[in-house]
Every structure is written in C-alpha cells, then in structure tokens.
Amino acid sequence: MTPLLQRLLTVLSDGELHSGQDLAAAVGLSRTAIWKHLQQMATFDVAIESARGRGYRLPGGLELLDRERILAALTPRARALLGELQVLASIDSTNSQVRRQPNASQPLAVLAECQTAGRGRLGRTWVSPFGRNLYLSVGWSFSDGAASLAGLSLAVGVAAHRALTAIGVTGLGLKWPNDILRDRHKVGGILLEVTGDPAGSCQVIVGIGINVAMPHAAAVAIEQPWADLADVGEVTRNGLAAAVLSELLPVLADFPTTGFAAYQEEWELHDAYRGARVRIATPGTQIEGIARGVTAGGALRLDVDGREHLINGGEMCLRGVP
Ligand code: BTN
C-alpha cells in the first residue's frame, strides 16, 4: 500500500463522510485524482462508499494499528525487552519480514495491517485481510540449540491465552500443538520458524495470527471452523497487540531458564481436548487414542489402548473423533 493510500485511509478510518475536496487537501492531490486512488483500496478489500456530490465514507470505520499507542500500552518489562517495533500497512508475511532483517535491533517485532502471503502451519495459507485482525511476528535469539526449544510453541500458546484473557475474551481453549480456540473454533494460530545452528545459536521467529473481526468475504477462504472476537465489547487491535507482546516477550526471555515445564500446568488447564478421543494425522499415517495432556517437553501424551505414546509436534494435525 502506498503512503498516499495510507494517509487517505487514516482520514477515512473514522467512518465519517469526507468531501473529495477535504480528502484532496489532506493529501495534496486534485479532487479528480482522489477517486482513482480510493478505487485501489478494493485491492485490499477495503470498500469505500461514495455518496454522489457529498464525498466518501468507510462504512463502520477502521481502527488502524498505531505504533505509539502500542508501545505506550506495553508493560514496563515488555517495553524493556523489546528492541524494535515495526508497524507496516502490507507485507507478504510478518514472519518473512523478520527473517529478512537479521541486523535489526533485537528482539524485533513486526505487525502488519494485512499479509499478501500469510503462512500457516503445514503449508497452509493464513487468511490475512486488511485492518481487521492481528498479524504479529517476533524474532528472538536463543543460544542453547534447537533441542532447548522443546515446548516453546506451547508456551507461546499460553502467552496468547493470557493476553486474550487479560482483554476480556472468554470461551478460550488451547489445542495441541498450538492452536488457540474460542468456543472450540480456531481464533488464532502460531507458526514458529527456526533458523541458524541447530546445536548452538539460533533465531526463532514466532508468528501469531488472531482473528479479531474477520470479514465474511475473506472468511470463505478459511478451510476450518473459525472464530473471531467481533462479539467481545471493547477489543481494540492496538490493545490486543500490546497485550500479546506484554505476555509473549517475558515468556521468550524466561524460556531458557524455565523451559516449558513452567507452563505445562497452565497449558493443561486450558487444554480443549484433554480426555477426548482424538486422531493424530501426519502426511503418511494416523493414530487414534485418548488425549492425556502434555509432557514437560511439550509432547502430546496419547493413550492408545492403555499404552502411552508420546507425539512430538512438527507435521502433525490433531482432530477430535466423534
Ligand atoms: C497456524 O496455521 O495455525 C499458524 C498461523 C500463523 C499465522 C501468523 S500471522 C503472523 C505470522 N505471519 C505469517 O505468515 N504467519 C504467522
């Protein structure tokens, strides 16, 4: 999205009617050029209404991400831990954006209004329309190798659960390995990507997507039962971003000393499938049993006919069996 479109959108984000003349003055363009630019918003699924002779309106308005508001709402510890916060209008994927900046001051957090190639687990697409949801990635360096990261993605799930609870969201649950559920539908997902030396210093990119007010036109592309926070009063995306960073950064900072063991009990408390019959599918196999919680290393404990199998993350997909 061009800076000019961003400026137009900022003016229109209040949901009020703005005359072509006012918009033109705000961005330094001619009135005739305004409509041409506003039409480009359709590319981002932002529908601008034009009222003949009266001006333009963005029905319902839009809460845009505001870097300063987010920074001001962080807890002191999170603020001290954060190296840099980037807020972008449009990017392919916030995870990719973190990966492209190895020299940014660390830890680097990237938020975007939309992702043109948002990525989910198992090679799926993460539906990322403009201005309605949360797309956040944080890059964090660990020095003790990939093995020390066991259970990290589940600990991130606990952080996201804490953040959503803190802003008043109810009906939450966690689904192994790292889905965030609301009323048993997926409201958020976590994508961890690790680069560097598997035995030494590595960088983890933690990507979190949370559906805040998913537009129905975009939702048709989601291939699983989904939820959002549209019915929760007073949720702001800036408040949610600050809440997630406030919970996430301390979890990442403490993880080398605590490991997942410190979060295991809390994870199990919110486990939406504990005691349920589930099927674990990998690309080639599937195994069915009763979910019995997780180990201190984040593996799923699956009871298969009375024998415990430990299932580690990776290319796994858990489904409830009716
Ligand atoms: C999942 O499949 O459940 C994981 C979804 C992760 C989506 C987030 S949105 C921010 C970050 N950028 C991406 O491209 N993916 C993650």
Image (cartoon, grey):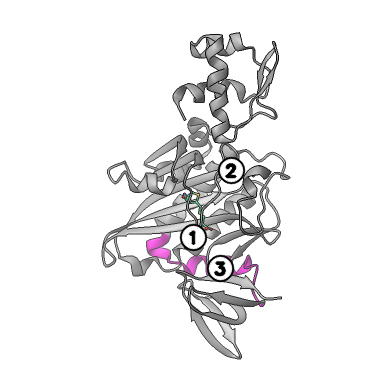
Amino acid carrying label 2: it is Asn
Q: Is residue 79 left or right of residue 62?
A: left
**Picture quadrant where residue 43 is located:** top right
Amino acid carrying label 1: it is Arg
Frontmost of labels 1 and 2 is 1
Frontmost of labels 3 and 1 is 1
Label 2 near label 3: C-beta < 8 Å?
Answer: no
**Which disc number belongs to residue 133?**
2
Q: From the image, which quarter does the C terminus lie in?
A: bottom right
The reply to whether the magenta stretch includes residue 258 is: yes
Q: Do we see residue 279 in this rendering?
A: yes
Q: Residue at x 39, y 65 (%)?
A: 149
Residue 51 place in picture, x, y as percent: 71, 17
Residue 161 place in picture, x, y as percent: 59, 56
Q: Residue at x 59, y 66 (%)?
A: 175
- Whichever of callouts 3 and 2 sits on the residue coming sooner in the sequence is 2
Label 2 neighbourhood size at 10 Å, few (<14), some (14-19), many (20+)?
many
Residue 312 place in picture, x, y as percent: 46, 74
User: Label 1: which residue?
Assistant: 121
Q: Mark 1 to mark 2: distance in Å?
A: 18 Å
- Compared with 129, 284 (above or below) is below
Q: Do we see residue 293 in this rendering?
A: no
User: Label 3: which residue?
Assistant: 176
Q: Secondary structure at mark 2?
A: loop
**Picture quadrant where residue 100 is located:** top left
Q: Which residues are magenta?
A: 255-275
Amino acid carrying label 3: it is Trp
User: Could you tell me how many numbered marks the image carries?
Assistant: 3
Q: Residue at x 27, y 60 (%)?
A: 201
Q: Mark 3 to mark 1: distance in Å?
A: 13 Å
- Whichever of callouts 3 and 1 sits on the residue coming sooner in the sequence is 1
